[in-house]
Image (cartoon, rainbow, N blue to C red):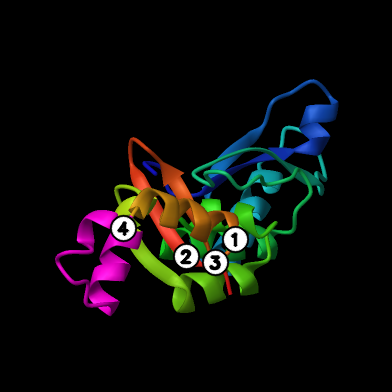
């Protein structure tokens, strides 16, 4: 991911009067700093007594979607998780429908590593945990083992063929 998580806060009083007024905010800064920036945006509104805002855009959240009226606390929590795990955090959150506790547990306890393919992971796992007699080595089908582990739900992967795969135990 090339962009840190940020949100575009739109002043709704201005927006409802046909004026675009808002700003991009770094969603990984402290929640107090985020609130201060939102207050500053509303305080600088071209419409008197502007009080309401909405999140009209976001970037740096990868596969996770931020909604227009998500709380700032929720956005901060999501952004912090993604910043903590920039290589797979957004996709892991999307995998668990935004359940941060579940995503964190998998990131901390069930992460196997980054591999070029599932086959590479299964081959390394097998060869590091089992002594394979040389005369049987040619009979091992790592492709089928990888397929079976994924289809049975033992593991899941996030990533792409171009960037590689982050493998997790699905426990």
Say which element carries label 1: loop
Residue under numbered circle 3: 154
Q: Which mark is residue 140?
A: 4
Comparing 96 with 49, the one in front is 96
Q: Are marks 1 and 3 in contact (CB under 8 Å)?
A: yes
Q: Are marks 1 and 4 in contact (CB under 8 Å)?
A: no
| Mark count | 4
Position in image of residue 51 (x %, y %) = 81, 49
Neighbours of disc 1 within 10 Å: few (<14), some (14-19), many (20+): few
Q: Can you tell which quarter of the image residue 44 is in?
A: top right
Say which element carries label 4: loop
* Relative to 148, 53 lies left or right: right
* Relative to 94, 139 lies left or right: left
Give the mark, 1 or 4, whose residue is nearer the N terminus.
4
Neighbours of disc 3 within 10 Å: few (<14), some (14-19), many (20+): few
- Whole-angstrom CA distance, mark 1 to mark 4, is 19 Å
Q: Which mark is residue 138?
A: none
Neighbours of disc 2 within 10 Å: few (<14), some (14-19), many (20+): many
Work out whether 3 lies above or below 146: above
Is 134 inside the magenta-drawn segment?
A: yes
Residue under numbered circle 1: 152
Residue under numbered circle 2: 168
User: In this picture, which residue range is highlighted in magenta?
Assistant: 122-140
* Residue appearing at x 24%, y 74% in the figure: 128
* Relative to 72, 16 lies left or right: right
- Whole-angstrom CA distance, mark 3 to mark 4, is 19 Å
Comparing 45 with 163, the one in front is 163
């Amino acid at each position: 991911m090339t962009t840190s998580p940020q949100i575009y806060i739109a002043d709704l009083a201005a927006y409802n009067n046909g004026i675009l007024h808002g700003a991009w905010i770094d969603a990984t800064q402290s929640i107090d700093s985020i609130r201060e920036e939102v207050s500053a945006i509303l305080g600088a509104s071209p419409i008197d007594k502007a009080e309401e805002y909405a999140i009209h855009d976001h970037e740096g959240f990868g596969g996770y979607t931020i909604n227009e009226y998500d709380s700032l606390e929720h956005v901060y929590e999501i952004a912090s998780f993604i910043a903590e795990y920039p290589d797979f955090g957004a996709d892991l959150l999307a995998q668990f429908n935004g359940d941060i506790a579940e995503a964190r547990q998998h990131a901390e306890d069930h992460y196997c590593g980054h591999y070029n393919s599932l086959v590479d992971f299964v081959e390394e796992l097998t060869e590091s945990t089992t002594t394979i007699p040389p005369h049987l080595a040619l009979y091992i089908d790592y492709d089928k083992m990888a397929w079976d582990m994924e289809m049975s739900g033992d593991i899941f992967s996030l990533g792409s063929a171009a960037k590689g795969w982050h493998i997790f135990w699905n426990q």
